[in-house]
Image (tube, helix red, strand yellow):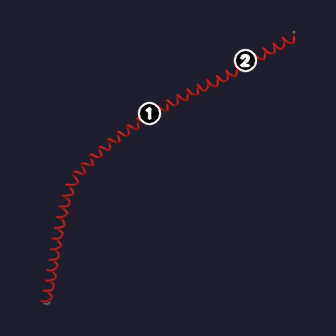
Amino acid sequence: MAAWFQALLWLGLLALLVALAAAALALRRAALRAEAVLAIVEQELRPLVAQTHALLEETRGLAREAKGEVERIQALTDRVGDAAHGVARVLTAVSGFTRAGQLVGLAAGLRRGIDMFIQRMRRNEGEHHE
């Protein structure tokens, strides 16, 4: 092999080694920066994780309270429904009494009317016989 060709190969190899060394140094600097950024993120993330856990516990407590309130409202609604059902039964009974009262009034009116009719008939008969 010619000397100039060997020199060219060695020069290319040296350029390749320099490029690899530069890339390795850049990679090392990027890794150091990433480590620093990750350390900052970790420092910032710890309080956020703690706050998130606290918020989750508070949310669970609020959900339990809301569930209790919904159950109380449901019980109250059931009681109001039962009371409304009782009032409806009382009103139905009163309505029945009212209807019975109307029928009793009608019967009393009919009786009174028949009595009056009979009295007039007797009076009329008495006036015709004399």
Vertical arrangement, residue 129 with respect to residue 24, above or below? above
SS at mark 2 in the image: helix
Instruction: Give the answer, above or below, for where 84 lies relative to 9.
Output: above
Which quadrant, please, contains the N terminus? bottom left
Q: Nearer the viewer, mark 1 or mark 2?
A: 2
Instruction: From the image, tell me which residue sits under label 1.
Output: 76
At x 46%, y 34%, the residue is 77
Pick whichever, 80 or 118, lies toward us.
Answer: 118
Determine the CA span between mark 1 and mark 2: 52 Å
Viewer-proximal residue among 38 and 67 = 67
Res. 112 mark: 2
Q: Amino acid at mark 2?
A: Arg
Which structural element holds mark 1?
Answer: helix
Q: Position of residue 38 (x, y in %)?
A: 20, 59
Q: Residues within 10 Å of mark 2 (few under 14, many from 20)?
A: few
Does residue 26 lie above or below 55 as drawn?
Answer: below
Residue 71 is situated, as x and y percent measured from the top left of the image, at: 41, 36
Classify residue 104 by image quadrant: top right
Q: Residue at x 38, y 39 (%)?
A: 67
Q: Determine the image quadrant of residue 123.
A: top right
Q: Tell me the quarter of the image containing the C terminus.
A: top right
Residue 48 relative to residue 118: left or right: left
Point 52% across, 30% down: residue: 85
**Amino acid bearing label 1:** Leu
